[in-house]
Amino acid sequence: MSADQILTVEEAGAGFAAAVALASKFRGQEIGAKSALASAGIPLSDVSSHLNKACLDDEKVSLALELCRKVRKVVAEQSGGWASRPLFERQWAARDFKRAVGNPAEGCLEELTSLERCLERKELDGLSGFKMLVEKVAGYHLHMQKLAEGYVKDERKLAEQLEILKGWQCEAEELAKLITS
């Protein structure tokens, strides 16, 4: 319900700076970042678009695109694999993913497809808006590592599974870094 009131750290900082610059106008009144920016004649959209523009060269865009495709493929394969499991396991896996990522697998795949399209078209404005999702996917892979450590008893199988999960986690983390650089 309060999504319209949420600001990024950068937007809040810009609002604070505007409030300080216009302190004599406000004369000790309490003011929010959005109001301060509006009083300074700076639309919030200008702050957001300026701050969210990634500075990626062609090589980094290509790497980010490759990583995005890998991350999306892993999520698609994992969620597709849930369909073959018994009902209880399928529901548990879907709920666990949604709890960890904050989005059901289908929604996550849609967002990753949007990120992929932006990278294909080299539309770099707003790429950092996907950062949180990608970081949460990386966190989900870390969560799965912890679950595996408590569940898989065969040390060889555990090592194999952890290596795969760590690889997926690293790919997502690297993608998150690239889209916010």
Image (tube, rainbow, N blue to C red):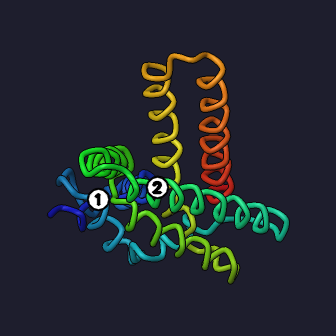
Q: Amino acid at mark 1?
A: Ile
Q: Choose between 175 and 100: the one closer to the eye.
A: 100
* Quarter of the image where the C terminus is located: bottom right
Q: Image quadrant of residue 44? A: bottom left
Residue sticking out furthest to the right: 59
Q: Image quadrant of residue 14? A: bottom left
Q: Is residue 44 left or right of residue 158?
A: left
Question: Residue shown at 44%/57% (left/top)?
Answer: 79
Residue 38 x, y percent position in the rendering: 32, 74
Q: Choose between 161 and 40: the one closer to the eye.
A: 161
Q: Is residue 59 left or right of residue 11?
A: right
Question: Residue shown at 32%/56% (left/top)?
Answer: 23
Report the Cα–Cα distance between label 1 and label 2. Answer: 36 Å
Q: Which residue is mark 2?
A: 81
Residue 106 x, y percent position in the rendering: 39, 67
Vertical comparison of 66 with 171: above or below: below
Crowding around mark 2 (Cα neighbors within 10 Å: few <14, some 14 to 19, many 20+) is: few
Q: Which residue is mark 1?
A: 6
Q: Choose between 1 and 157: the one closer to the eye.
A: 157
Residue 49 x, y percent position in the rendering: 52, 73
Residue sticking out furthest to the bottom: 121
Q: Nearer the viewer, mark 1 or mark 2?
A: 2
Question: Residue shown at 14%/64% (left/top)?
Answer: 1
Q: Earlier in the sequence, mark 1 or mark 2?
A: 1
Q: Amino acid at mark 2?
A: Gly
Q: Secondary structure at mark 1?
A: loop
Q: Choose between 142 and 44: the one closer to the eye.
A: 142
